[in-house]
Image (cartoon, helix red, strand yellow):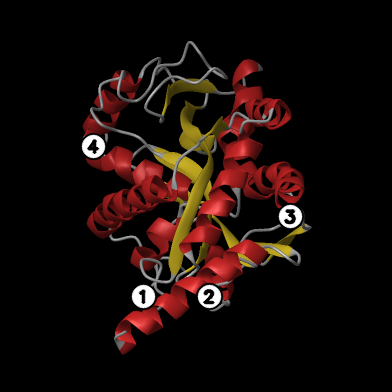
Amino acid sequence: MKVRDLIAGLCLAACTATAAAYPDRPIRIVLGFPAGGGADVVLRTVTPGLAEELGQPVIVDNRPGAGGNLGMDIVAKAAPDGYTLLMAAPGLATNASLYEHLPFDPAKDFTAIGMVSSVPNVLVVTPSLPFQSVAELIAYAKDHPGELNYASSGIGTSLHLAGALFERDAGVKLTHVPYRGGPAAINDVMSGQVQMMFSVLPLAVPQIKAGKLRALAVTGATRTSALPDVPTMIEAGLKGYTATTWNGLVAPAGTPAPIVNQLNAALQRVLDRPDVRKAFAGMGQDVVKDTPQEYDAMLKQETEKWQQVIKAAGIKAE
């Protein structure tokens, strides 16, 4: 037997043994955002089921900071043994373009496990504005470049990038007004201090139904059950426009494929649970089930898409 074949056989045996024993202790899922936020609620909705499916405690470890970079760095440097995972957000696809120097490589330092959920944003305007459609808003913005302000939850956030994508695809110039978080931003849109914003659904839907905001379009590929009468941006005339906020699980690069597949299978079973689906529906979240390969392809597509948007708009994180 050749030495190379012997080494390969030993590696295969080691991986098989590791997968067979996995997991034999608690699993930690790092989240680069504070407790109580949207991603945190999504993660805590699936962790009890994951613990049952895997037969070990699943611990949420909130590590907020630097737009999610702190949490990503922790997982990128963790042992690739399936015991330290990351609840990823759009920053995994955008932060390499937003930050000049990252201590990790988002494209190389992680292994995709599977998507968890996705939620479209919704374009809302203050009700005092006369716009009843996206077309009317675009027409006004073209005649009054830079006059309309749009709020966001901060520079480089998915809500900011949704606005930048809108500017590019609609051929308009808006003025970005960043806030520290979505609630402060949406409050100023409701009061009329800022005219519009792209908001996550859970934050905006109650205000839309109360008449405090007017919804013009949602940013998913299809309409959402939370606002069935509101068209998509594509239906409103912007071909190919989508901008969703999503979450998924990834592991450190080099995590053995049997462990990745085991985690994906457990996740799929959890996402099929009626209680999880009901909870997600209540948050306006869409359950997303896919394979590690499909999630990896999605991450590559998102990275390329937003890299172009960020570069064209000259956006840099503070």
Q: Which residue is mark 2?
A: 14
Residue 152, image x, y percentages? 50, 46
The answer to which of marks 4 and 3 sits earlier in the sequence is 3
Q: Is residue 233 above or below residue 44?
A: above
The answer to which of marks 2 and 3 sits earlier in the sequence is 2
The answer to which of marks 1 and 3 sits earlier in the sequence is 3
Q: Quadrant of residue 241?
A: top left
Residue 148, image x, y percentages? 37, 37
User: Is residue 104 in view?
Assistant: no
Q: Secondary structure at mark 3?
A: loop
Outermost front residue: 1
Tell me the mark number nearer the camera, choosing from 4 and 3: 3
Cα distance, mark 2 to mark 3?
37 Å
Tell me the mark number nearer the camera, choosing from 2 and 4: 2
Q: Quadrant of residue 271?
A: top right
Q: Which residue is mark 4?
A: 169
- Mark 3 belongs to which amino acid? Ala
Cα distance, mark 2 to mark 4?
51 Å
Total number of numbered discs in the rendering? 4
Residue 36, image x, y percentages? 74, 49
Q: Which residue is mark 1?
A: 100
* Contact (Cβ within 8 Å) of mark 1 with mark 3: no
The answer to which of marks 1 and 4 sits earlier in the sequence is 1
* Contact (Cβ within 8 Å) of mark 1 with mark 4: no
- Which disc is residue 35 wearing? 3
- Mark 4 belongs to which amino acid? Asp
- Mark 1 belongs to which amino acid? Glu
Residue 201 is left or right of residue 299, and the answer is right
The local crowd at label 2, few if under 14, some if 14 to 19, many if 20 or more residues have their Cα within 10 Å, is few
- Mark 2 belongs to which amino acid? Ala
Tell me the mark number nearer the camera, choosing from 2 and 3: 2
